[in-house]
């Protein structure tokens, strides 16, 4: 590895772990995720497409940028608001993003026509479904050739978003997945030393998920790690609610340490360690919850900051098999009954 790159990576990963989960601010990840009373206002430097992402890309390249990022949000989305308040309000992150990309905003319910970089025509709504933006905010990164090379789905704390930006801008995606890239910052035994939160609904070892699913229930796999404040928040807040626990009771639920060598038989019948399985699934955020049907197919995953309304909505979607009747989670959720804690 060239000396300069080695120094860059050392500085980057030192920064990541100085601000990573064990030391991240509560104000970054703790917020009410109910629908906002007032519509969001985009940052004034966000851009809006005139209808052709190919033209938007050429404009960005003419200014020396590496590509474009499409932002998919909703007008009353609490997660979008938190993204604006944290990562988008961070001067260093904002400067880095604007140096390398133009960020183009879309509403996932929008009806305006958009031509993607491959020449195919969609409405904003159709484009959001095409890129499987199950959760807002979602970001699609396009390289200079107009190829979508990376997707972030949901809200992440600033340290994780900063890492994703560098992963794409420095073109590490050409050599490895984001989970592999971020795992290089893993500090040995650190994430194994802290215990995981024990809950009575977790199935014990051996973790044979293929056999487990023979009861015809969906399976929820919690990928967590030790010393994980975000994991503690998930269990003490959204997963302490009675409505959440009622839905969890209808599933097979397994908890794995994403850094451990724990033997697992996956829902597809493959034998591997929890660590290797997490990497094969490109798990890069803890906690992540991946849901599988009784045949071992992935239904949906929640791999970003998640509070009660989003978590309950996904649990309900899985248990009601909404994926069989609707082509996307957001469309299905819109048709369901409102809930309150």
Image (cartoon, grey):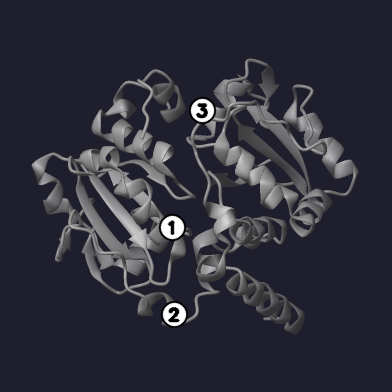
Residue 323, located in which quarter of the rendered image?
Answer: top left
Instruction: Say if residue 120 shows up in the picture.
Output: yes
Q: Secondary structure at mark 2?
A: helix
Specify whether 320 is left or right of 139: left
Give the residue number, with chain letter if any, for mark 2.
Answer: 190
Image quarter where the C terminus lies is: top left
Instruction: Kindly check if marks 3 and 1 are in contact, taking CB atoms under 8 A apart as contact.
Output: no
| Mark 3 crowdedness (10 Å alpha carbons): few <14, some 14-19, many ≥20 | some
Give the Cα separation between the discs numbered 1 and 2: 18 Å
The label number, if any, that marks residue 129 in the structure image: 3
* Residue 66 to residue 1: above or below: above
Q: Residue at x 44, y 45 (%)?
A: 307
Whichever of labels 3 and 1 marks the residue nearer the N terminus, that label is 3
| Mark 2 crowdedness (10 Å alpha carbons): few <14, some 14-19, many ≥20 | few
Q: Foreground residue, 334 or 85?
A: 85
Q: Residue at x 88, y 49 (%)?
A: 64
Give the residue number, with chain letter if any, for mark 1.
Answer: 283
């Amino acid at each position: 590895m060239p000396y300069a790159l080695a120094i860059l990576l050392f500085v980057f990963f030192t920064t990541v772990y100085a601000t990573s989960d064990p030391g991240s601010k509560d104000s970054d990840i703790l917020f009410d995720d109910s629908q906002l009373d007032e519509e969001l206002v985009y940052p004034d430097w966000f851009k809006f497409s005139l209808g052709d992402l190919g033209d938007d890309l050429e404009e960005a390249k003419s200014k020396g940028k590496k590509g474009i990022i499409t932002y998919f949000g909703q007008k009353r989305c609490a997660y979008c608001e938190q993204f604006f308040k944290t990562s988008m309000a961070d001067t260093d992150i904002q400067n880095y993003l604007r140096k390398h990309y133009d960020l183009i905003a879309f509403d996932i319910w929008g009806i305006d026509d958009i031509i993607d970089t491959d020449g195919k025509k969609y409405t904003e709504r159709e484009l959001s479904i095409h890129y499987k933006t199950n959760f807002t905010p979602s970001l699609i990164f396009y390289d200079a050739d107009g190829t979508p090379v990376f997707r972030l789905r949901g809200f992440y704390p600033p340290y994780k978003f900063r890492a994703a930006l560098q992963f794409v801008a420095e073109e590490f995606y050409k050599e490895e997945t984001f989970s592999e890239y971020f795992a290089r910052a893993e500090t040995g035994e650190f994430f194994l030393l802290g215990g995981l939160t024990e809950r009575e609904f977790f199935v014990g070892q051996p973790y044979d998920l293929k056999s487990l699913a023979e009861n015809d229930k969906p399976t929820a796999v919690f990928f967590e790690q030790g010393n994980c404040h975000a994991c503690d928040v998930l269990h003490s807040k959204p997963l302490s609610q009675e409505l959440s626990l009622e839905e969890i009771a209808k599933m097979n639920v397994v908890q794995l340490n994403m850094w451990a060598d724990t033997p697992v038989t996956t829902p597809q019948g493959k034998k591997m360690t929890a660590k290797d399985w997490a990497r094969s699934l490109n798990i890069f955020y803890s906690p992540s919850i991946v849901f599988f049907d009784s045949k071992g197919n992935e239904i949906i995953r929640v791999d970003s900051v998640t509070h009660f309304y989003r978590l309950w909505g996904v649990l309900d979607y899985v248990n009601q098999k909404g994926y069989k009747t609707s082509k996307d989670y957001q469309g299905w959720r819109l048709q369901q009954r409102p809930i309150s804690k």
